[in-house]
Image (cartoon, helix red, strand yellow):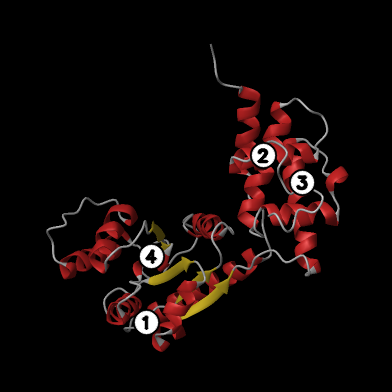
Amino acid sequence: MSFLDTAVASKISALKALHYDFPRANDLRAGISWMITDYWAKASSGQSFEARGLMVTGPSRIGKTGEIRHQLDQLNDGSTLMPDGRSVRIVSVMLKGTMSWKDLGVHTLREGFGLPTSGRMTQREIWDMVGFHAREQGVHGIHYDECQHIFPRKSAEGRAMILDSFKSLLKKPDWPLMLILSGVDELAGHINSEEQLAYLLRPVPFREISLARDADVQELNRLCFAYGDTAGFDFTPLSSMDFYRRLSRACSYRWGLVIELLIDALVEASRSRDVRLDTCHFCRAFTDRNSLPSGYSPFTIEDFEPLF
C-alpha cells in the first residue's frame, strides 16, 4: 500500500520552491553590495585592509536565514570577480547550541570548508587552519547563523574575547574575511558593546508584522495571493483585515511562520480536493501544527486575541 500522494507532494514542492521577495530583501541586498564593493576597492589596492560585514537581526522564524542564503546563492554564482581573479564566495555556518570559540573554529572547518578536523588541535591551530583554507579555497567571507549562541551569558570576559576574535577575522593581515552575523535581537546587544566591531558591521533589522503599518498589510496581502496562485487557489474570498489579523496572530507576527502556515493550509486544501480556499483549512493546519483540539484556533473563535 502506497502512503505517497504524488499530487500533494508536487504541490508541496512547488510551494517550497517559491521565493517571495520582501522589501527587506532590498535592504539586505544593498548591505551585501556595500560590503562586497568595499572589499573589492580595498583589496585592489594591494595593501593591508580591514573588511566590513553585516549584522542581521530579528525574532526567530521571521525569515532571516532563508533570505540570507537565497542572496548568498546569487552572490556565489560566479559572476562577481574579486581582485585576486577568483569569484567571490561566502560560506554559511549555522551555530547549533552553545559553543566555545574553539568549537566554532572546528565547526567552521567542517561545515564551511568541508574539512575533517581533530579536536586535539589547539584553538590557535584551528583558527590558523580557517584562515589558510579560506585563502586557498577563495572564501572571502563567512555567514554565521544563530550567532547569539556563541556568547556566554555569565562571563563578560568571555564575551569580550569573542567580540575581539570576530574583529580579528575582519582585520586578518593576510586574508581579511567579510562577516555576516545573523541571529535574534539579543545579538545586537552583544555586538554593540564592542564599539570597534559595531562600526565595522552594518545593521540590517528584520521587523515583525505590524498591521498598523499600511505597507505590512499590503505585503501580507501580496504574499497570500502569491502562494495562493502558486497552489492554484484564488485568495480573494479571504482577503480582509479580519483574516489578516487572525493570520498574523496565529503566526506570532513572524513572516516566516506566515509562509509556513500558508503552505500547510494550501496543502490541506489540496489534500481535501477542495476547489475553494477557506478558513477551515487554516484552522486545521494551525491545530495540527500546535497539537490543539479541532476547531480551537484564531480562525474560528470570534474573540480570539485574549486566547492566542
| Residue 300: mark in rendering | none
The answer to whether the residue labelled 4 contacts the one labelled 1, judged by CB atoms less than 8 Å apart, is no
In what quadrant of the picture does the C terminus appear?
bottom right
Going from N to C along the chain, the mark reached first, 2 or 1, is 1
Q: Which residue is mark 3?
A: 299
- Foreground residue among 286 and 255: 286
- Give the Cα distance between marks 2 and 3: 11 Å
Going from N to C along the chain, the mark reached first, 4 or 1, is 1
Secondary structure state at the residue bearing disc 1 = loop
Q: Position of residue 249 (x, y in %)?
A: 70, 56
Answer with left or right where residue 50 lies relative to residue 19. Answer: left
Residue 91 appears in the rendering? yes
**At x 75% / y 49%, what residue is drawn?**
224
Residue that protrudes farthest toward the bottom in the picture: 195
**At x 67% / y 34%, what residue is drawn?**
267
Q: Nearer the viewer, mark 4 or mark 3?
A: 3
Q: Amino acid at mark 3?
A: Phe
- Give the Cα distance between marks 4 and 2: 31 Å
Q: Which residue is mark 1?
A: 50
- Give the Cα distance between marks 2 and 1: 49 Å
Q: Nearer the viewer, mark 4 or mark 1?
A: 4
Q: Amino acid at mark 4?
A: His
Q: Amino acid at mark 1?
A: Glu
Q: Count neighbours of disc 1 (C-alpha within 10 A) and say few if under 14, some if 14 to 19, many if 20 or more.
A: many
Secondary structure state at the residue bearing disc 4 = helix
Q: Which residue is mark 4?
A: 149
The answer to whether the residue labelled 4 contacts the one labelled 3, judged by CB atoms less than 8 Å apart, is no
Q: Amino acid at mark 2?
A: Ala
